[in-house]
Amino acid sequence: MSKIIRIFLMVTVLMSAGIACAQVDGTIVLIEGGRKLNGTIQWSLRDKAYKIKVRGGNVELSIGPEKIQSLLIPKPAELTRAEELVRDGQAGQAIPILQKIIGGYFKLNWDETATRLLADAYLAEGRAKEAIDVCEKIISGSPESAYIGDMAPAYWRALLMGDRVVKLENLLTKAVKEGDRATSAFALIARGDLILKSGNTNENNSKALRDGYLRVVTLYRGVKEAQPEALYKAAQCFEKLGQSSRADTMRTTLKGEHGSSEWARK
């Protein structure tokens, strides 16, 4: 049994017993009046509610998610370290750190971010099945995270590498229709990748541009986080089609407007 499976089994057992997997300092912002409660927060699966021991007293409150506007929980220092490791090509070292964060921050803001990064780390090592499995642990409790939110693009990349084409197509369609602007933009990029997976032909390069990358470049300019990848991949398609001047235009925009991005350094 793999380490990540053991961790999730332990998490499930603890939560099923009503025992919190983590207790972290933070703030619960309530919908009603925007009231803020500061203290130690934990999630109970048995009660399907957040427990908070309010700072400065011995009172513990149980609050359902439907009453909460947001959770304000500091980013774990270990997550920053893991991000650096993945960025520097040391995905293997990041994996155990991320597994620990996922177990400790379940339903406490940072689990999906850590899952997205863990999926990326697995993908960097060519381990599509592990990437899919770790994402689907989160999706089992929050089905919408398969097509909306921080983790979704990593899940799509895992499905693409794992040849789960039909499932991926369905999720991308849902993301474009129901997601916010950022989600839709990344879904269009993933659609371009999916088109090219069936063959790097002129027809597919044209279709990937039309239905994916170029739509993001032209129609989603306000989604800055999606622009570097879309510009880079659009340039590649134009180059394959023999349209060097248009490819150069994409690269010039990429380096001029997003010079600090990983895509500009490729």
Image (cartoon, grey):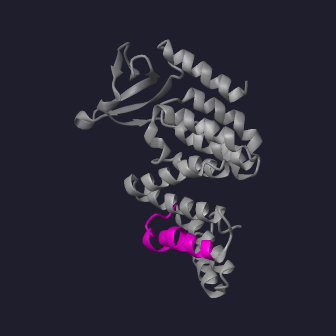
Q: Nearer the viewer, residue 76 or 156?
A: 156
Q: Is residue 153 magenta?
A: no
Q: Nearer the viewer, residue 188 or 104?
A: 188
- Residue 151 located left or right of residue 57: right
Query: Can I make out residue 235 in this image?
Result: no
Tell me which residue sits at (45%, 58%) in the image.
184
Tell me which residue sits at (35%, 14%) in the image.
59
- Residue 81, located in which quarter of the rendered image? top right
- Residue 132 located left or right of residue 53: right
Q: Where does the image place residue 40, in percent across and percent down from the top left?
A: 45, 23
Query: Can I make out residue 39 in this image?
Result: yes
Q: Quadrant of the N terminus?
A: top right
Q: Where does the image place residue 121, in percent across and percent down from the top left?
A: 69, 45
Q: Nearer the viewer, residue 91 or 137?
A: 137
- Residue 66, located in which quarter of the rendered image? top left
Q: Is residue 207 magenta?
A: yes
Q: Nearer the viewer, residue 98 or 175?
A: 175
Q: Where does the image place residue 105, in percent across and percent down from the top left?
A: 54, 30
Tell me which residue sits at (65%, 41%) in the image.
131
Q: With respect to residue 159, does 138 lie above or below?
A: above
Boundaries of the magenta span: 203-225
Q: Where does the image place residue 52, in percent across and percent down from the top left?
A: 40, 21
Q: With respect to residue 200, does 65 lie above or below?
A: above
Tell me which residue sits at (28%, 33%) in the image.
35
Q: Main secondary structure of the magenta part?
A: helix
